[in-house]
Each structure stands twice: as C-alpha cells, then as structure tokens.
Amino acid sequence: MASHFAADAPHLASCRPSAPEDRRSHPSGEALPTAPLAASAAPDFRPKAKGDPFDVRTEPTVPKPRCVIEAIEPMKGLRLEDRKLYNVILALSWDRLQDPAASGGFSAPAIALRRAIDRKTAVDNQRLRDSLCRLERTKLSFPRLRLEGAPCEETMPLVSWAFLPKGGRMAEWDFPPAIRRDLAAPPVWTQLHLAACARFKSKYALLLYERLSLRRNLRHPVWRVSVDELRAQLGASQRLAGWDPLRRRVIEPALVQIATYTPLEVSMEPRSAPGSRLVTEIVFTVGVRSEPGTRFWLPRRS
C-alpha cells in the first residue's frame, strides 16, 4: 500500500551541515563535488530536502542528482509542467528513497500537487494526469560510468509507474530501481529551489537552471559546453540549428528568467573555433547573490 502525504504533513527534514567535500570525475572530464560516503555507510552525509514542497514560505529545496539532471530526453519529450511536477514528487519522496530496497510507492493529494507547480487555477486533474503519464512513458538516456571507467548510457523513464484515476484525489507513483540507487546515495547533486522552479515560464529556463546549479559551489564555477551538446541537453529543436537562433530564442530568454527567479548570477561567453567566426562553444560562469533580480551579463556583440 502506498503511503500518503497529507497536505498538512510536517515539513520534510531540514538540510544538515555538509561534510568535507570530495571530488570525482565525470565522463566529460569535469570534477564536481560528491557525497563523502554512501548513504548506507553514513546516512547523515546524504543531502536533505528542506522545507515543505506544498508551502513556499518554508523555502523548499530538493537535492537532485546529476545523473537525473543530465538525462537526455527525445525531441518530443517532457513539457515544462512535467519537469516541475517531477521535482515536487522527488522532494516528497526523498526521505523514504534513502533505502533503495524499500517497497511500496508514494502518493500525495492531487490538488496540492497542482498548486505546487503553479497550476492554482486548474479545476480538474486532467493536465496533472497527462504529466504523470508522460513521466511514466517518456524514456530518457542517462549517462553512466562502467566499473572500468568507460562511459555508457541507460534508457528508462523518470517514474516506473504513476496512477491518478478520474475523479480521484490522490496521485501515486514510484521510481525505477536503477534510478532509486542514485537517489539513495547520489555521488553528485545540487539543491534546487522549488519555488523558483514553479515560476519558470520556459522548459529551457528550468533545464538550464538545473545544469548551472550543479556548478555554483565549485571552486571554479564554470561550465564549458559545445553548442551541439547544449542544444541536446536542453532538448532544443533542430530548427534552432546554429548559434544565433539558439542564443536569441533559447539561451538569452532562459537567462533572463534565471536572473529573475533565482539567486544565480550568470555570465555567458560564446567562443569561436580558431580562425573562424563560427561559435562552437559557450562558457557559463556561475555566481550566487543573496537576492534574485540582478540581470545576467552578456558580452558586447561584435
């Protein structure tokens, strides 16, 4: 039987002070902070969800593993509201996910889920049901490392099953076993602000925010990414081929929203191939300010 989260349930566990930082390499060659020990060996070192996902006054956050953030979806994949919903149900499930072998699914009131993803005016659960269906049916590619260190990919949906009957008040879901291992003891993660996630107006903005958040606490908070890889990471259409349409229609509007809704302060530097004016790489530098609202910085166009 799935356990139910009441709308007036106690707040989730608060964040605890982090242990000394470890660093581990990734298939891209980039070093990111990792958990010092596996959750099974040292539960206190597992990142904690903060606040109540159903009450923005508690400033709720959710730890999201890098492998889930960087999963690549197909061109006709998940929508913005699907991504928002996943972050909320991940926060609601986080404490019980500490045990990857725990049986049973998770559940929450449908009306509370709608409000948490900023769909307060919805009068029924149809769009929420559609989002759960897409989360269950859309298969994403997850980057992995084999034991010998060679990169590989696994393909699976973000949730293994989801259920919200017509006229029902409770939504239910569970996570694939392969993902539950990463959720139980994530080696690399970032804390996402759920209130900010709920306010994003573009899927590109939410996806870029998650990827930039991974770098914000690094000693050198820089993300160097090729134009082609960035397009794939954000699920941008091939109709946006080339740097200029990607910049105008995806990157710059996304950075405006990130500057408005989050404490991240981001600079962006397009770089061209040697001896060419063709932009092939973008360098993002990430900072953190105390209050959102400062506009991001863009270099002057030549």
Image: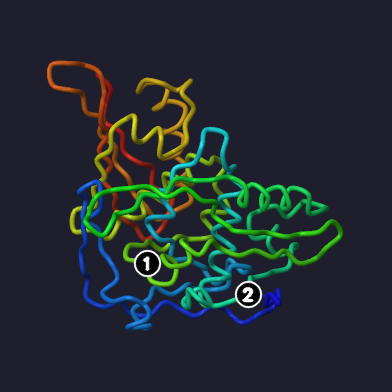
Residue at image point 58% right, 70% down = 92
Splitting the image into 4 quarters, where does residue 41 fall? bottom left
Residue 241: x and y in percent read 41, 21
Foreground of the two, 33 or 256: 33
> Circle 1 sits on which residue?
186
Foreground of the two, 24 or 120: 24
Residue 239: x and y in percent read 48, 20
Residue at image point 61% right, 82% down = 10
User: Quick check: 221 above or below 53?
Assistant: above
Q: Left or right? Give the position of 201 relative to 276.
A: right
Q: Residue furthest front?
A: 148
Residue 68: x and y in percent read 44, 55
> Circle 2 sits on which residue?
104
In the rendered image, which quarter contains the C terminus?
top left
Looking at numbered disc 2 in the image, what kind of residue is underneath it? Gly
Label 2 Cα neighbours within 10 Å, binned few <14 / some 14-19 / many ≥20: few
In the rendered image, which quarter contains the N terminus?
bottom right
Considering only order in the chain, which callout, 1 or 2, is on the residue closer to the N terminus? 2
Label 2 element class: loop
Foreground of the two, 291 or 21: 21
Q: Residue furthest left?
A: 275
Q: Left or right? Give the position of 239 relative to 121.
A: left
Label 1 element class: loop
Residue 172's disc number: none
Q: Left or right? Give the position of 177 relative to 82.
A: left
Looking at numbered disc 1 in the image, what kind of residue is underneath it? Pro
Residue at image point 43% right, 75% down = 48
Q: Nearer the viewer, mark 2 or mark 1?
A: 2
Residue 240: x and y in percent read 45, 23
Q: Residue furthest right?
A: 167
